[in-house]
Image: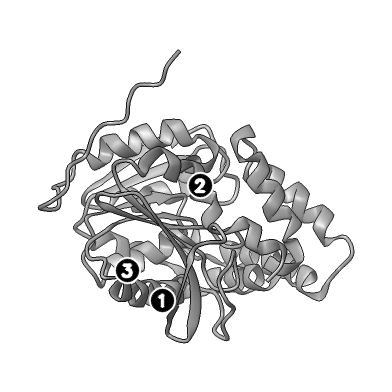
Amino acid sequence: MGLRDRVGVPDDAAMVEVLGVRLAVAREGEGPAVVCLHAIGHGGGDFAALSALLRDRFEVIRVDWPGQGRSGAEAQPASAARYAELLEALLDRLGIAAPILLGCSIGGAAALHYAARQPVRALVLCDPGGLIEVTPAVQRFCRLFAHFFAAGERGAWWFPLAFRAYYRLVLPAPAAREQRRRIAAAAFESAPVLRQAWAGFAAPAADLRALAAGLDVPVWFAWARRDRIVRFALAKPAIDRMRRASVTLFDAGHAAFLEQPEAFARAFADFAATLPLPATASIVPLPARRA
């Protein structure tokens, strides 16, 4: 590992091997299970502030994807479908059934795949992939990004500077500043999985609109209105086709839970309070923010 471990879950997190991959997993708190799935090139550290706000009423489970955070690498390329397979094996190993899945970007796409195969209480999707038609223009856009990250994989001298500038657009909010710096510092280490993922986003299989339309579970979209890559307007037609979807827009760049953790936590608790409870669980609303 190296610099990327600082982006991930805490260093005392458990290492769980599934399907030949060692995944770093942090479990905090008690209550209904909330499984947090991060964006590509990020780590479970994205959810640290949110976990601190929720763990007195939920069990917050944070996972580092392969080759990111503190998890080990694997031979298979990064993709939402592969991550869903790993998630399915992981939750089975941990004995976690019907959780709330909270996924951002590729993590949201993995959550959609998982929910098509396994029971979930609900999905919380933050600017997820898979809800925009993979047109020739979208394919060219994704391949351009794949070429950009391939330069980082080759070790191009200019890549860290460009990557840092790019992440000022991705995570512009002050609350995300420290995690953004950690992500930028690990630019060279993250470049291979970023290149793999962006190449995969251009494939027809990355289009999950039909899968999403077939889901019959509560889905809350917490969308960052300033996202310049995964634009809400382009995903809205797919969201409108979903059976039980609701949307909240946040003043953020890509990850509302990281950029506006307190507002996100309150809205999350309100959404969770509308869900049928597990037999032994109860949900206490978050207190109002003090002036």
Q: Secondary structure at mark 3?
A: helix
- Residue 114, labelled with which disc? 3
- Distance from Cα at disc 1 to Cα at disc 2: 22 Å
Q: Which residue is mark 1?
A: 86
Amino acid type, label 3: Tyr
Q: Which numbered disc, 1 or 2, marks the residue closer to the eye?
A: 2
**Would you call the spot at circle 3 few (<14 residues within 10 Å), some (14-19), or many (20 or more)?**
many
Q: Secondary structure at mark 1?
A: helix
Residue 111 picture location, percent across and down: 36, 62
Amino acid type, label 1: Leu
Q: Which residue is mark 2?
A: 48
For this orientation, the residue located farthest to the left is 279
- Distance from Cα at disc 1 to Cα at disc 3: 10 Å
For this orientation, the residue located farthest to the top is 291
Q: Is residue 93 above or below residue 231?
A: below
Q: Secondary structure at mark 2?
A: helix
Can you tell which quarter of the image residue 220 is in? top left
